[in-house]
């Protein structure tokens, strides 16, 4: 990666941080009053919703308590049947390579979460088949839930188009992947089709002591 490529990636990550930090006019966004004065644990719990989801293995989980709290994670929203120029299957295949690069850390101290945007069709069984087709390994959960739950989660996480018409158009969904270290409150994002090596590096650079490239 040269300096220009890195700066492009950094710009995308910065945009992702801004989107994740707050969603304008979202009823699920944390209240600003007193937010900065909260303890880290309070602030973290108030930042994310703790809604129920179901994994591709049929396990019932809570988004914050079971999936995020205390963990390093990488997450995205997707369709198993994608109308956005096949960005979802391409993105899933890309993340399979990222999982391979991170090796045994996935499922141990890094966790992948892919949340369907089509819960009416993407049942746990359909998601399990999808995961198998792509060769996703343990440590990567494919998740579904009630339609309203999914919509609230995507808004809470910043996956929102400010144009309400485009926001409802399945061909316009964001091809971004979020990654972060929840207990350190470090979050960023990049396009899901970024080279797998650099997605893995972006994530590990956020870790304490992680080496970051210079741009000089």
Image (cartoon, helix red, strand yellow):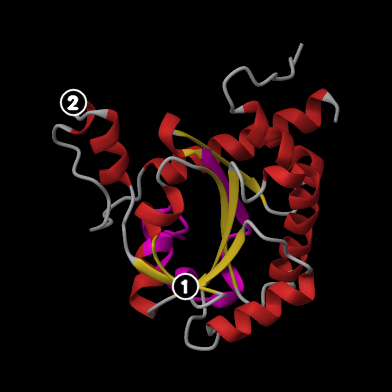
Circle 2 residue? 37
- Mark 1 lies on a secondary structure that is loop
Kindly indicate whether the residue at mark 1 contacts the one at mark 2 (C-beta within 8 angstroms).
no
Task: Work out whether residue 167 or residue 139 is closer to the camera in this orientation and state it.
Answer: 139
Q: Residue furthest top?
A: 216
User: Could you tell whether 172 is left or right of 193 in the image?
Assistant: left
What residue do we see at 37% from left, 53% from top? 64
| Left or right of 46 in this view: 185 | right
Q: Where residue 92 sits in the image (x, y, percent)?
A: 72, 64
> Within 10 angstroms of label 1, few (less than 14), some, or many (20 or more) residues?
few
Q: First in sequence: mark 2 or mark 1?
A: 2
Whether residue 10 sits left or right of residue 181 in the image: it is: right
- Residue 174: quadrant of the picture: bottom right
> Does residue 149 appear anywhere in the picture?
yes
Quadrant of the snapshot with the C terminus: top right
Is residue 161 found inside the magenta-colored segment of the image? yes
Task: Characterize the local packing of mark 2: few (<14), some (14-19) or many (20 or more) Cα atoms within 10 angstroms.
Answer: few
Picture mark count: 2
- Nearer the observer: mark 2 or 1; the answer is 1
Please report the bounds of the magenta region as a residue range.
Answer: 153-180
Instruction: Residue lying at the far right in this picture: please name it.
Output: 2
* 110 shown above or below 210: below
Residue 168 versus residue 40: which sits nearer the camera?
40
Q: Nearer the viewer, residue 147 or 159?
A: 147
Distance of label 2 from label 1 (alpha carbons): 36 Å
- State yes or no: residue 9 in magenta: no
Of the 4 image quadrants, the one containing the N terminus is top right
Residue annotated with mark 1:
59
Element type where label 2 sits in the image:
helix
Above or below for 85 versus 93: below
- Point 38% across, 79% down: residue: 146
């Amino acid at each position: 990666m040269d300096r220009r490529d890195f700066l492009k990636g950094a710009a995308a990550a910065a945009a992702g941080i801004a989107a994740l930090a707050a969603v304008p006019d979202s009823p699920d966004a944390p209240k600003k009053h007193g937010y900065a004065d909260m303890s880290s644990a309070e602030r973290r719990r108030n930042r994310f919703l703790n809604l129920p989801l179901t994994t591709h293995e049929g396990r019932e989980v809570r988004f914050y308590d079971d999936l995020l709290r205390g963990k390093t994670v990488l997450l995205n929203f997707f369709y198993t049947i994608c109308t956005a120029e096949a960005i979802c299957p391409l993105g899933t295949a890309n993340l399979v390579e990222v999982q391979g690069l991170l090796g045994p850390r996935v499922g141990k101290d890094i966790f992948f979460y892919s949340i369907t945007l089509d819960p009416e069709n993407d049942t746990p069984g359909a998601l399990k088949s999808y995961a198998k087709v792509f060769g996703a390994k343990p440590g990567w959960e494919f998740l579904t839930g009630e339609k309203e739950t999914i919509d609230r989660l995507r808004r809470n996480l910043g996956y929102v188009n400010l144009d309400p018409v485009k926001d409802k158009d399945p061909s316009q969904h964001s091809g971004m992947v979020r990654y972060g270290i929840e207990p350190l409150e470090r979050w960023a994002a990049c396009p899901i089709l970024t080279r797998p090596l650099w997605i893995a590096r972006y994530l590990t650079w956020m870790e304490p002591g992680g080496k970051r490239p210079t741009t000089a």
